[in-house]
Amino acid sequence: MRKVVLVLLVLLGAAALIYACWGRPYLNSMQEDLEALSELPVDVLELSDSEDGIYQGSFAAGPIAVVLQVRIAGHRIDEITIVKHEQGRGKAAEEITEQIISQQSLQVDTISGATYSSQVIVQAVQDALHQAAR
């Protein structure tokens, strides 16, 4: 019985050491990436020189990643299709695409409870629009 307790204590100590050396710094780095999202610039839309078409954009921060397509027609954002959205509880953020389309702006309010995913989606749309401007 003492051997089992000793082995468990050694394993627990090893797990704590691994977390302290690699896990915690990784989690801190991920949180810093997410918090930095609010500092990223968001462009004012200028689509007058953009050609009609479908443009792909992507963006990732921490555990959140988005790949999407933006369709431009008549110098307006006509449709946004999310191809891939890796998120924790941020699925609700996908509603932000409707706001972007209706307001024809990237300066939209984030979705409550899905702030980071909302910000990643906005950055991915911005990436697609940069493709359209080339």
Image (cartoon, rainbow, N blue to C red):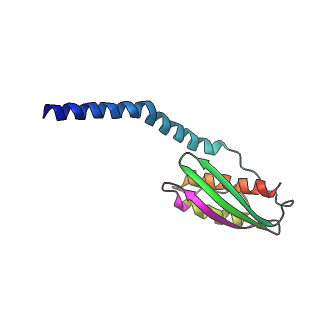
Q: Quadrant of residue 46?
A: bottom right
In magenta stretch: residue 84: yes
Horizontal side, residue 90 vs residue 67: left or right: left
| Relative image position of residue 6 (x, y in whole percent) | 20, 30
Please tell me which residue is depicted at 77% across the width and 53% down the height of the picture. Answer: 130
Q: Quadrant of residue 75?
A: bottom right
| Relative image position of residue 58 (x, y in whole percent) | 66, 54
In magenta stretch: residue 3: no
Question: Seen from this angle, which residue lies furthest left?
Answer: 1
Main secondary structure type of the part rendered in magenta: strand
Horizontal side, residue 35 vs residue 50: left or right: left
Please tell me which residue is depicted at 48% across the width and 56% down the height of the picture. Answer: 89
Residue 40, placed above or below residue 97? above
| Relative image position of residue 96 (x, y in whole percent) | 62, 61
Q: Quadrant of residue 54?
A: bottom right
Q: Which range of residues does the magenta coloring cover? A: 73-92
Residue 124, placed above or below residue 102? above
Of 132 and 111, nearer the camera is: 132
| Relative image position of residue 32 (x, y in whole percent) | 55, 38
Of 68 and 89, nearer the camera is: 68
Of 53 and 34, nearer the camera is: 53
Locate the C terminus and report the quarter of the image it occupies: bottom right
Horizontal side, residue 40 vs residue 14: left or right: right
Please tell me which residue is depicted at 82% across the width and 55% down the height of the picture. Answer: 133
Count of labels in the image: 0
Locate the N terminus and report the quarter of the image it occupies: top left
